[in-house]
Image (tube, helix red, strand yellow):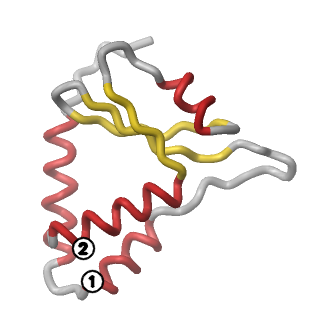
Amino acid sequence: MRSGKKFDAVKMMCKIRDKLSKEFENMSYEGQKRYMRERVKPAKQAGGDKMKQFIVIHHNGSVFVEAVRAESRNEAMVAVKRSGFSTLVLEEDEAKSLAEFILQTVKL
């Protein structure tokens, strides 16, 4: 169900990128990794909770990202499947590795 509010993902991504660029300006790569680790916390799990956090990347000419909790990668894929989109489901650790790779490659 949609809320009817307009959301510009590209504008938000640019704002976040600009903010990070400013904050990372005088940081070493290790400092950047520490900064991200301190701010990206793993999902809390209740006692016997088997749910895991997955990061989902969708693409259909533009890209958007969402987080979903599910018991398995397949269950996460079913929960977020969208017609006409290419979708990639990453476990939280995989998403962190991808983010580190991007930070190292792009050098914001």
Q: Looking at the image, which is closer to me, 86 or 13?
A: 86
Q: Nearer the viewer, mark 1 or mark 2?
A: 2
Identify the image quadrant of the N terminus: top left
Residue at 85 percent of width and 52 percent of height: 47
Q: Secondary structure at mark 1?
A: helix
List the single residue furthest toward the right: 48
Q: Mark 1 to mark 2: distance in Å?
A: 7 Å
**Would you place residue 97 above or below residue 46 in this image?**
below
Residue 16 screen position, x and y as percent: 22, 55
As drawn, 95 above or below 34: above
Amino acid beneath label 2 = Gln
Q: Quadrant of the C terminus?
A: bottom left
Q: Which mark is residue 6?
A: none
Tell me the residue at 80%/45% (across/down): 49
Q: Secondary structure at mark 2?
A: helix
The residue labelled by disc 2 is 104
Using the image, tell me which numbered label, if any, was put on residue 29.
1
Camera-side residue of 67 and 16:
67
Instruction: Using the rendered view, name the quadrant where residue 39 is placed.
Output: bottom left
Vertical arrangement, residue 93 with respect to residue 23, above or below = above
